[in-house]
């Protein structure tokens, strides 16, 4: 089975899960009629987080899907773990005493990290990223754990991102108000989100702007989720450049066409959109079922987004990207001229704050590096160093 076949099979499994558990399947005989009459609200309201109305139906390939409304806060179970170089503590959006142990300091930049579907913030890449950020700069790092809400069927987890976005935004507002800072201080906050976490970051920025009159400083979307978002034209319901002062996006697993075989967002979502290796198939991700376990095969391209971002923090080598007509021209070295200094993909993207679409090639494996077309060809010929 080739790479396209694997993607189609996996996507179909998610679709089946969505249809069966959302009641979209034809066989509904075991579901009481009263479920549809009384348990299908058009909106839900959760205290200070406000009300959430049903959003328009979306298309995923040939299927029309109605995204779920967010579950209540206790069901989503969002927690916030604050790390600094001096300490650690679990914080919330109402108790200032909890900010003392980890030594929260508003003079530092505050970076939120938001995980994706079926993940948590207690292990894996979020911990690795937190450590890399604290090693690189003196900052406050807040890991957002919404694993209870993320380990639902996909359609429900999509709905839960809206509540998590509001919760993160309320925490930012609390941190600013509790330290008697001006609304302009929101520009000191930066959100890094992977997959559904990337779409959640957009909701944070939108909520802050509409409810608090604040503008978030920066969002980095690490291959923001595509399923249930690709067909959305309304920027209120997907990551968009208007969600922060600067939005940069790394695309690693887009679909090749209008189908549902890619797990990353197909449309551009930032001021700058970076497409390493073309943004679809990543170099070094094996393409056949016999070469790699099924789950790892379908995750490889998608997860490269956070791997590249962490590498941009820990590797001294350049992650310089350049504008091209398309990836095929980039692969041939037919670059367009940068307007000033060429941008860097990843952590340093806000140094030049470019606008547009940018391409680069990477090494096939760890330690991940940005490569020129000549260097990538040499690696293909002679293997990774």
Image: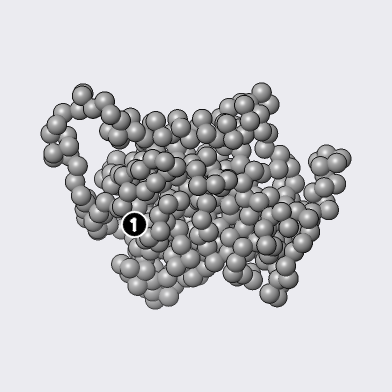
Relative to the observer, which residue lies in front, 233 or 195? 233
Relative to the observer, which residue lies in front, 54 or 98? 54
Name the residue rendered at 40%, 59% in the picture. Answer: 233
Q: Quadrant of residue 151?
A: top left
Left or right: 301, with 44 as reference point: right
Does any portion of residue 113 appear in the rendered image?
no
Name the residue rendered at 21%, 23% in the picture. Answer: 30
Could you say where residue 347 lies in the image, as x and y percent from the top left? 62, 59
| Quadrant that contains the N terminus | top right
Name the residue rendered at 12%, 34% in the picture. Answer: 34
Could you say where residue 181 lies in the image, as x and y percent from the top left? 40, 74
| Quadrant that contains the C terminus | top right
Relative to the observer, which residue lies in front, 383 or 335? 335
Crowd around label 1: few <14 · some 14–19 · many ≥20 (10 Å): many
Name the residue rendered at 20%, 24% in the picture. Answer: 29
The residue pinned by badge 1 equals 166
Could you say where residue 296 lies in the image, as x and y percent from the top left? 59, 32
The local secondary structure at tag 1 comes to: helix
Left or right: 50, with 230 as reference point: left
């Amino acid at each position: 089975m080739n790479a396209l076949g694997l993607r189609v099979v996996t996507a179909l499994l998610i679709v089946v899960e969505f249809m069966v558990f959302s009641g979209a399947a034809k066989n509904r005989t075991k579901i009481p009629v009263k479920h549809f009459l009384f348990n299908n609200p058009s909106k839900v309201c959760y205290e200070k987080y406000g009300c959430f109305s049903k959003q328009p139906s979306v298309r995923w390939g040939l299927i029309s899907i109605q995204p779920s409304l967010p579950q209540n806060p206790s069901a989503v179970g969002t927690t916030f773990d604050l790390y600094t170089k001096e300490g650690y503590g679990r914080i919330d959006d109402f108790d200032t005493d909890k900010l003392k142990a980890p030594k929260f300091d508003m003079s530092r930049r505050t970076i939120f990290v938001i995980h994706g579907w079926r993940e948590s913030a207690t292990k894996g890449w979020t911990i690795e990223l937190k450590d890399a950020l604290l090693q690189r700069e003196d900052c406050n790092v807040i890991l957002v754990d919404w694993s209870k809400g993320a380990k639902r069927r996909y359609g429900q987890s999509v709905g839960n991102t809206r509540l998590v976005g509001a919760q993160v935004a309320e925490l930012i507002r609390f941190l600013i108000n509790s330290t008697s800072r001006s609304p302009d201080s929101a520009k000191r906050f930066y959100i890094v989100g992977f997959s559904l976490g990337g779409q959640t970051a957009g909701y944070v920025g939108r909520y802050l702007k509409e409810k608090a009159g604040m503008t978030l400083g920066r969002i980095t979307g690490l291959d923001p989720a595509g399923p249930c978002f690709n067909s959305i034209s309304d920027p209120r319901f997907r990551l968009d450049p208007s969600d922060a002062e600067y939005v940069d996006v790394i695309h690693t697993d887009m679909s090749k066409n209008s189908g549902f075989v890619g797990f990353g967002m197909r449309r551009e979502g930032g001021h700058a959109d970076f497409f390493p290796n073309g943004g679809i198939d990543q170099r070094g991700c094996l393409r056949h079922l016999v070469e790699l376990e099924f789950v790892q095969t379908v995750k490889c391209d998608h997860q490269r987004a956070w791997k590249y971002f962490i590498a941009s923090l820990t590797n001294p080598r350049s992650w310089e990207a350049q504008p091209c007509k398309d990836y095929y021209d980039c692969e041939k070295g037919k670059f367009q001229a940068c307007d000033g200094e060429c941008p860097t993909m990843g952590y340093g993207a806000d140094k030049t704050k470019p606008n547009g679409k940018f391409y680069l090639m990477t090494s096939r494996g760890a330690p991940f590096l940005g490569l020129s077309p000549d260097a990538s060809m040499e690696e293909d010929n002679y293997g990774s160093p």
